[in-house]
């Protein structure tokens, strides 16, 4: 008969681990990683909040710019826009809203982001230097009473300052979105929307807000601007638009928006449809 084995000594009691194994320290919103993330976000939001208070005073300027831009575009003018880096993306966002639409359907409006003309940009930079990449395009495309809008967080970009001087020489109305003033770009332009923040990220974020607000005002004023220019004012979806008689000094006959189809009735005469 086998001898009984001695009993094993009991293990000291430890923390309960359950079926999932030893408990791991948590790093949620109250842990070290969460705290670090919260501090970065809180700091950014605090800087944004500080800039929002003075930014509210920009309402009047954006409303006036939106009205002026609507009238100039309705009369056949053009908006030229430029920026470097993140401001280039902001500028291209603006032209997309005008050529496309912000919210409601309307006719496309003429707006060009100069930095998006990559072949021209690189050719000019190669032949004339980077300081001229926008100024030369302004001299090529700008016409008197067009609007040139230049975006810069620092307001010190030499190529944008050169573009502003070229625009003013060509008779364009020059506006700027910048960071704090004074700065060289603000000095070179007729008017400036300046964001009172030392943080370039906050400046760019409020430039984006400004883009949307500016386009809102353009859309609000556009029907009246088209009427003043003798253009077709689009009606609600599914209804026919109405043609407004041309204003004094406007070309004879309405400038029609939308698609027109020209038909030949077989006699050599052409009839318009659409």
Image: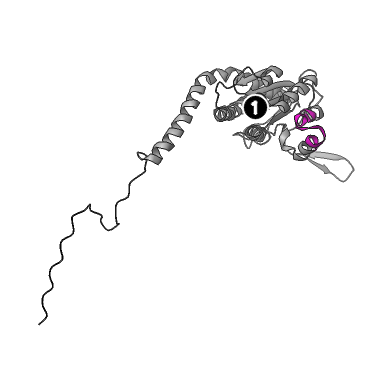
Q: Nearer the viewer, residue 26 or 165?
A: 26
Give the residue displayed 23% in from the left and 53% down from the top: 16
Give above or below for 217 relative to 265: above
Q: Nearer the viewer, residue 180 or 260?
A: 180
Residue 246 visible at all = no
Quarter of the image containing the C terminus? top right
- Residue occupying the far right of the picture: 268
Quarter of the image containing the N terminus? bottom left
The segment highlighted magenta reads 123-137
Give above or below for 19 relative to 165: below
- In the rendered image, residue 126 lying in the magenta stretch gets the answer yes
Q: How is the image coloured?
A: one colour
What kind of element bears circle 1?
Answer: loop
Q: What kind of secondary structure does the magenta stretch mostly adopt?
A: helix
Q: Position of residue 104 (x, y in %)?
A: 60, 34
Q: Position of residue 27 (x, y in %)?
A: 36, 43
- In the rendered image, residue 25 lying in the magenta stretch gets the answer no
Name the image quarter holding residue 193: top right
Q: Name the residue under label 1.
A: 152
Q: Where is residue 267 in the image (x, y as percent from the top left)?
A: 89, 44
Q: Where is residue 269 in the image (x, y as percent from the top left)?
A: 88, 40
């Amino acid at each position: 008969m086998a001898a009984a084995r001695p009993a094993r000594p009991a293990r000291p009691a430890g923390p309960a681990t359950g079926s999932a194994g030893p408990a791991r320290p948590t790093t949620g919103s109250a842990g070290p990683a969460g705290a670090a993330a919260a501090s970065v976000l809180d700091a950014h939001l605090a800087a944004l909040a500080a800039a929002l208070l003075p930014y509210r005073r920009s309402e009047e300027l954006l409303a006036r710019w939106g009205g002026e831009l609507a009238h100039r575009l309705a009369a056949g003018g053009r908006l030229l826009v430029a920026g470097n880096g993140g401001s280039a993306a902001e500028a291209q966002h603006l032209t997309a809203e005008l050529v496309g639409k912000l919210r409601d359907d309307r006719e496309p409006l003429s707006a060009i982001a100069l930095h998006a003309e990559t072949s021209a940009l690189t050719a000019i930079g190669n032949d004339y230097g980077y300081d001229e990449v926008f100024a030369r395009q302004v001299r090529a495309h700008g016409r008197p009473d067009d609007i040139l809008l230049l975006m810069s967080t620092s307001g010190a970009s030499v190529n944008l300052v050169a573009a502003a001087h070229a625009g003013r020489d060509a008779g364009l109305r020059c506006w700027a979105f910048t960071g704090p003033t004074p700065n060289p770009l603000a000095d070179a332009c007729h008017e400036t929307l300046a964001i009172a923040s030392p943080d370039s990220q906050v400046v760019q974020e409020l430039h984006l807000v400004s883009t949307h607000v500016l386009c809102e005002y353009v859309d609000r004023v556009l029907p009246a601007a088209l009427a003043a220019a003798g253009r077709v004012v689009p009606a609600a979806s599914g209804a026919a638009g109405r043609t407004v008689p041309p204003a004094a000094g406007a070309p004879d006959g309405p400038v029609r928006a939308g698609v027109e189809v020209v038909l030949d009735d077989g006699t050599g005469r052409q009839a318009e449809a659409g």
